Amino acid sequence: MAPNRGYIETVFGFVETWETLSDVEAVMKAISLIVAELGFSSFIVTGLPLLNRPLEPLVLLNCWPDGWFERYCSQNYFEVDPIGQNVLATSSPFLWDRAPYRRDKTLSKQMMGEAAEFGLHDGFCVPICSATGWQSAFSFAHDRKIDAGPKELAAAHLLALTAYGRLRVLIGEAPPARRRLTPREREVLVWAAAGKSAWETSALLGISEATVITHLDHIRRKLNAANTTHAVVVALRIGELQPC
């Protein structure tokens, strides 16, 4: 990977002109050129699905190699993808090879091997967290080992955040209905929907496990739900858990 050394000026140029991009196709074209200058070969911008829910509706831009996206979704690879699972656990950008295997290690290694065959050998991922705690990501990829320094990765980070913000504006989602849950309760329920235990959620949010359990109790009462799984279903139906 040998990035064009004018990448910093290119990225800042994008930051200065992003408001002139009037549709998603224009954003895709602009980003594709910059990604190449940064030394990457492909990328994807997507929200991350709740447990046992599809990825496809959450994808904002897909520039993965032909055939890989279809295979990834058909095999439900997000569940064993160390990159996607790591986004659920951190807010800091990371190189793909720094992501631990959090699920079935054998299946995870198999998935990463198949990705490499499609030209996704190495990469850099930028987690993006909305105001409600919903997780998204901008993931850059290359067919060879990445040889990028802090400046290249910082430029990719800035590009990811700016592009994601513009995409959300262009999508123009309708204003949410009146909320029943507090912002903290929504954060707790998002992590519960992602399969996190009360203890794991407490560590992620920096609060006590008892506080998480109390929040979950309040959530179930407010949504008139029999259990936490039921609360997630109700919250999705009434718009309490929507990516934004």
Image (spheres, rainbow, N blue to C red):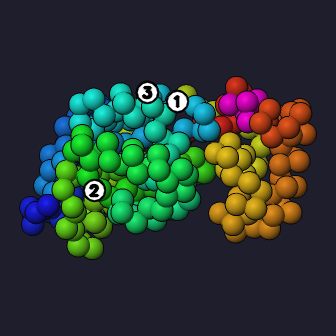
- Of the two numbered discs 3 and 2 on the same chain, state the one appearing first in sequence: 3
Residue 235: % across, % down: 73, 33
Q: Of 236 and 165, which appears nearest the observer?
A: 236
Q: Is residue 82 left or right of residue 15?
A: right
Q: Nearer the viewer, residue 151 or 10?
A: 151
- What secondary structure is marked by label 2? strand
Q: Which amino acid lies under the numbered mark 1 shown in the image of this protein?
A: Pro
| Image quarter of residue 73 | top left
Q: At x 24% / y 43%, what residue is drawn?
A: 117
- Residue 2 drawn at (x, y percent): 10, 63
Q: Is residue 149 visible?
A: yes
Say which quadrant the C terminus sits in: top right
In reply to whether residue 234 is colored magenta, the answer given is: yes
Disc 1 to disc 3, C-alpha distance: 10 Å
* Amino acid type, label 3: Ser
Q: Secondary structure at mark 1?
A: loop
- Above or below residue 79? Residue 174 is above
Provide the residue designation for mark 1.
54
Where, by quadrant of the figure, is residue 242 drawn?
Answer: top right
Mark before the other along the chain sequence, 1 or 3: 1
Q: CA distance from mark 1 to mark 2?
A: 24 Å
Residue at 81% x, 64% y is 209
The circle drawn on residue 122 is 2
| Label 1, residues with CA under 10 Å away: few <14, some 14-19, many ≥20 | some
Q: What residue is drawn where x is 45% and y is 31%?
A: 75
Observer able to see residue 86: no
Mark 2 is on which residue type? Asp
Tag of residue 194? none
Viewer-side residue, 29 vs 109: 109
Which residues fall within the magenta stretch? Answer: 232-236
**Res. 74 mark:** 3
The verdict on residue 163 being magenta is no
